[in-house]
Image (cartoon, helix red, strand yellow):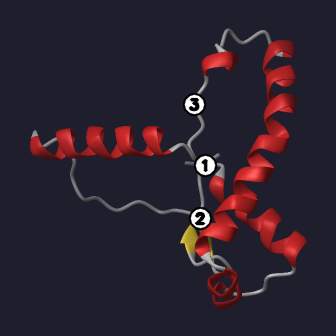
Amino acid sequence: DCHGLPIEHEIEKSLGLKSRCEILQMGIPGFNQECRKVVMRYSQEWKRIVKRLARWIDMDNDYKTLDFKYMESVWWACKELFKKGLIYRGFKVMPYSTGCGTSLSNF
C-alpha cells in the first residue's frame, strides 16, 4: 500500500501528534478512524480526477486498500504464493524515513 503513510502523516500533522506514544494514547482504532475519514474525504475528488484522465475504472464498485476484505485477499494471495515456493527473501535499497521508522514506497 503506497497511500497509508501520506494519510497517516496528514492525520499526525492535523492532530499535532509528534510520536508513536501519542498515537497509542489516542488509540489505534481512533487513529484509524481519522485516517479513514481522510481517505473518504478525497474519494470524490479521486473519482473526478480519474475520469479526467480518461482511465477506465469502475469507481462505483471500487476497493480501497484500507478495506479489510481487500487486506485479507492480499494476505491470502501471499500465503498461496508462499506455499508454492514463489516468495523469497531478498535485499533491495529502499528510501527510508527515519521519522516514521519505515521504508517508503517507490511511488
Q: Which residue is mark 1?
A: 2
105 sits to left or right of 33: left
Under tag 1, what secondary structure?
loop
Residue at 84 percent of width and 43 percent of height: 41
Residue at 89 percent of width and 70 percent of height: 14
Please identify the quarter of the rendering in which residue 73 is found. Answer: top left
Task: Pick whichever, 36 or 2, lies toward us.
Answer: 36
In the displayed structure, 90 sits above or below 70; it is below
Under tag 3, what secondary structure?
loop
* Residue 53 image label: none
Q: Residue furthest left?
A: 84
Mark 2 / mark 1, whichever is N-terminal: 1
7 sits to left or right of 86: right
Q: Does the CB distance between marks 3 and 1 fall below 8 Å?
A: no
Task: Report x, y in % for residue 62.
Answer: 61, 24
Label 3 vs label 2: CA separation? 27 Å
Residue at 44 percent of width and 45 percent of height: 71
Tell me the amino acid under the disc marked 3: Tyr
Label 2 vs label 1: CA separation? 13 Å
Task: Report x, y in % for residue 28.
Answer: 60, 73
Sort mark 3 into few (<14), some (14-19) or many (20+) by Cα contacts within 10 Å: few
Q: Which residue is mark 3?
A: 63
Tell me the amino acid under the disc marked 2: Pro
Mark in front: 2 vs 1: 1
Task: Report x, y in % for residue 76.
Answer: 27, 41
9 sits to left or right of 74: right
Please identify the quarter of the rendering in which residue 63 is found. Answer: top right
Q: Does the CB distance between marks 2 and 1 fall below 8 Å?
A: no
Q: Which residue is mark 2?
A: 95
Mark in front: 3 vs 2: 3
Task: Pick whichever, 36 or 49, lies toward us.
Answer: 36
Residue at 11 percent of width and 44 percent of height: 83
